[in-house]
Image: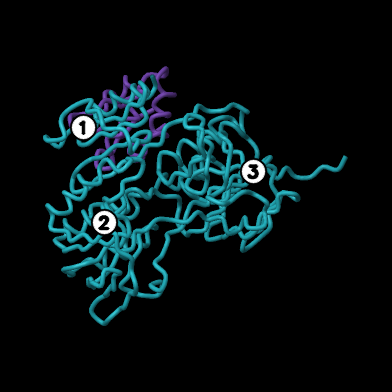
Chain colours: A cyan, B purple
């Protein structure tokens, strides 16, 4: 028998999900080689603070690092920075990158998602997006000395950006093609509450409009809207979501119609796994496949994949969780609030701006939200386990 | 092992108090309160789990 070097495991994507997979593998006793390939030049970092502490100027860039370089080194990884995966060949168990071809025994896809840009604005210097640490630092710099800005997208990121603009005393106009603000997984229950916050802080909101054209002038940027109006700002921030990074999988044979389709262990094909924003896991609680772009899913999926590869054991399915802070209001969300079920107030009172609310369907709690009531929110999580 | 928490980073998710209630609590704003910074050996595993699960990465362990 010919002996060859064990190719071990390759993780594509030095993201939170990718790093958590590596930590979990080592914690669960995986001793083979782990190779981590990262497209960015940075050590893995946290994204949630980018639109919060970093944009508000409270944190320096280094505070977003997930681990120190020393802790990172302790994992014993072969780490290649600034290197893109370009093609996956499942039959030959090889992945080709911009610099080399790597053989693997197992592969984890943790390439995350890229920001969606507004077509035609890609090269406009006054149009910003917010996805990477470099984006956040660039936007923070662009906010200095300006008085008005346009935000495209009234989702959770757009709302956080508007909050930050307000703290800087910058007037914001928000545009969205939807009829109201959108927070993920909340079934529309908080749309009017968020809109009230916009109004209270002097934000001009234009809902249900399409953008016909965008023009950049020397001093600003102007949007022509489908209702015949124009809105202008000195800069614009586009927050219209992300696209999973699956380009290198185009010829792989995997189902990549909405990220990488996986079972409830993160398995996409024999020896091929995916975790984090790029992955669409089967959720055994809801019976649906769900692609989630949030920090907690990236952590939990990373832990689960690492454990499954190292030990063969499955991890229990969890509920999606996200948090936000909008105009100083701390919002925590677990599960999925259903649009057609009225909210049950579990603690506090909406009129006091402090409450925990849930949707309960046939005795089953499907989602819980905490609005400025974190401790009671945590205590109420037991409702979801019942 | 010594535990450090960063209350500037904490977002009050309460994951730490859920999995390691003998080490972590939350104040009225939901922010993490460290009950002990040097857990006994039997609690080291749950402390590590809390640090891993913290969505804000606000818990650091010094081995």
Does residue A281 sit above or below A249 in this rendering? Answer: above
Label 3 marks which chain's residue?
Answer: A
Q: Which residue is mark 1?
A: A373
Judging depth in this view, the residue of A66 and A118 nearest the camera is A118
Q: Which residue is mark 3?
A: A272
Q: Give the mark nearest the N terminus, 3 or 2.
A: 2
Mark 3 and mark 1 residues within 8 Å of each other at the beta carbon: no
Quarter of the image where the C terminus of chain A is located: top left
A257 relative position to A241: left or right: right
Spatial CA span between label 3 and label 2? 37 Å
Q: Pointer 3: residues within 10 angstroms few (<14), some, or many (20+)?
A: some
- The secondary structure type at the circle numbered 2 is helix
Residue B19 visible, this orientation: no
Percent of width and height locating residue B45: 44, 24
Q: Which residue is mark 2?
A: A161
Q: Residue at x 46, y 45 (%)?
A: A16
A356 relative position to A261: left or right: left
User: Where is residue A282, by image quadrant?
Assistant: top right
Percent of width and height locating residue A31: 63, 35
Does residue A160 sit above or below A148 in this rendering? Answer: above
Residue A374 visible, this orientation: yes
Label 2 marks which chain's residue?
Answer: A
A173 relative position to A261: left or right: left
Residues marked 3 and 1, same chain: yes
Spatial CA span between label 3 and label 1? 41 Å
Residues marked 2 and 1, same chain: yes
Percent of width and height locating residue A53: 26, 50
Percent of width and height locating residue B51: 39, 33
Q: Pointer 1: residues within 10 angstroms few (<14), some, or many (20+)?
A: many
Q: Pointer 2: residues within 10 angstroms few (<14), some, or many (20+)?
A: many
- The secondary structure type at the circle numbered 1 is loop
Label 1 marks which chain's residue?
Answer: A
């Amino acid at each position: 028998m010919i002996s060859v070097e064990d190719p071990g495991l390759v993780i594509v994507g030095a993201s939170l999900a990718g790093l958590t997979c590596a930590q979990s593998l080592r914690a669960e006793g995986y001793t083979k080689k782990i190779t981590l390939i990262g497209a960015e030049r940075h050590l893995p970092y946290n994204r949630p603070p980018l639109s919060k502490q970093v944009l508000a100027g409270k944190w320096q860039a280094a505070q977003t690092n997930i681990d120190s370089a020393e802790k990172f080194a302790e994992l014993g990884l072969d780490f290649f920075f600034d290197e893109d995966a370009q093609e996956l060949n499942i039959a030959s168990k090889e992945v080709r990158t911009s610099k080399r071809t790597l053989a693997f025994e197992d592969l984890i896809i943790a390439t995350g998602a890229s920001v969606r840009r507004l077509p035609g604005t890609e090269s406009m210097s006054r149009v910003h997006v917010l996805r990477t640490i470099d984006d956040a630092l660039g936007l923070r710099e662009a906010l200095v000395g300006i008085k008005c800005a346009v935000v495209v997208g009234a989702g959770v990121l757009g709302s956080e950006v508007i909050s930050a603009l307000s703290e800087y005393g910058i007037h914001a106009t928000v545009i969205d093609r939807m009829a109201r603000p959108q927070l993920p997984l909340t079934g529309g229950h908080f749309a009017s509450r968020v809109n009230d916050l916009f109004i209270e802080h002097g934000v001009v909101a234009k809902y249900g409009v399409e953008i016909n054209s965008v023009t950049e002038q020397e001093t600003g940027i102007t949007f022509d809207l489908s209702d015949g109006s124009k809105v202008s700002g000195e800069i614009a921030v586009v927050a219209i979501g992300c696209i999973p990074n699956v380009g290198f999988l185009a010829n792989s044979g995997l189902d990549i119609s909405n990220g990488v389709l996986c079972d409830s262990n993160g398995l996409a094909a024999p020896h091929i796994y995916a975790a984090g924003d790029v992955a669409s896991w089967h959720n055994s609680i809801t019976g649906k496949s769900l692609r989630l772009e949030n920090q907690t899913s990236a952590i939990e999926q990373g832990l689960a994949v690492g454990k499954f590869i190292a030990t063969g054991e499955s991890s229990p399915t969890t509920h999606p969780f996200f948090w936000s802070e909008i105009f100083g209001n701390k919002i925590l969300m677990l599960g999925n609030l259903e649009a057609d079920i009225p909210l049950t107030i579990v603690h506090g009172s909406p009129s006091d701006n402090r409450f925990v609310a849930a949707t309960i369907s046939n005795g089953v709690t499907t989602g819980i939200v905490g609005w400025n009531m974190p401790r009671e929110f945590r205590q109420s999580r037991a409702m979801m386990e019942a | 092992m010594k535990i450090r928490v960063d209350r500037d980073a904490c977002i009050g998710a309460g994951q730490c108090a859920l999995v390691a209630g003998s080490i972590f609590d939350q104040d009225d704003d939901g922010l993490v309160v460290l009950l002990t910074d040097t857990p006994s050996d039997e609690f080291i595993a749950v402390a590590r789990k809390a640090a891993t699960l913290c969505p804000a990465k606000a818990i650091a362990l010094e081995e």
